[in-house]
Image (cartoon, rainbow, N blue to C red):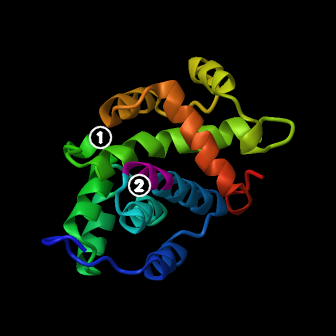
Amino acid sequence: MAKGIAPLPSREAAWALVCRYVHGEGLRRHMLGVETAMRAYARLRGADEERWGITGLLHDFDWEIHPTPEQHPELGCRMLVELGYPEDVVQAIRGHADYLGVPRTTDMAKALYACDELTGFLAAVAYVRPSRRIADVTVEAVMKKLADKRFAAGVNREEVYTGAREFGVDLCDHIAFLIGALSDNAAALGLG
């Protein structure tokens, strides 16, 4: 552990927190998808895979109990502080909500923002494929669906574009990377 970085509760403790507050299977799968994406990027960039993964796993843990912008994720972040989660994890989770105005100053925070909306969008694209397999999704199909504002209308396209730009990755490369990462964990994500 690097000097000055608080210890991280275990992945098992984080999953127990998710299971306590998140009952919807779709939301759990989304959180597992973001965890998968974050772990893959941490490996690629030589970062702390456990820290990045747990941040991705927990980013929406309070959504069902705090479903409004006035509550989510701020009240969940306060819960995480009380539970001893380190500041960098909490700040990254705060930063995934543009409306809080929290700057994304770390690679981990930028990765979370870049992966969150796009991971959910990729799952939606996979669900409309005949096979329902993420491995069958192409970058071209995703770009076409992004241009169709009626498809997965709840996904904030501007956050998808801004996330890739802030994280310093080409959007098409980012999409391809996430398709590969999610394919590696497809069964657990309901995408295999």
The residue that disc 1 covers is 98
Q: Who's the residue at 50% across and 34% down the image?
A: 174
What's under tag 1, amino acid-wise?
Asp
- Which percent across, then down, holds residue 53? 44, 62
- Magenta residues span 40-45
Q: Who's the residue at 47% across and 58% down the image?
A: 39
The residue that disc 2 covers is 42
Estimate the spatial distance between the alpha carbons at disc 1 and disc 2, rounded to whole Å.
23 Å
Q: Is residue 100 left or right of residue 73?
A: left
Circle 2 residues within 10 Å: few <14, some 14–19, many ≥20 = many
Nearer the N terminus, badge 1 or badge 2?
A: 2
- Which percent across, then down, holds residue 88? 23, 62
Q: Is residue 4 magenta?
A: no
In the rendered view, tell whether residue 189 sits above or below residue 124. Answer: below
SS type, badge 1: helix
What's under tag 2, amino acid-wise?
Ala
- Judge whether residue 62 can be spotted in this image: no
- Which quadrant holds the N terminus? bottom left
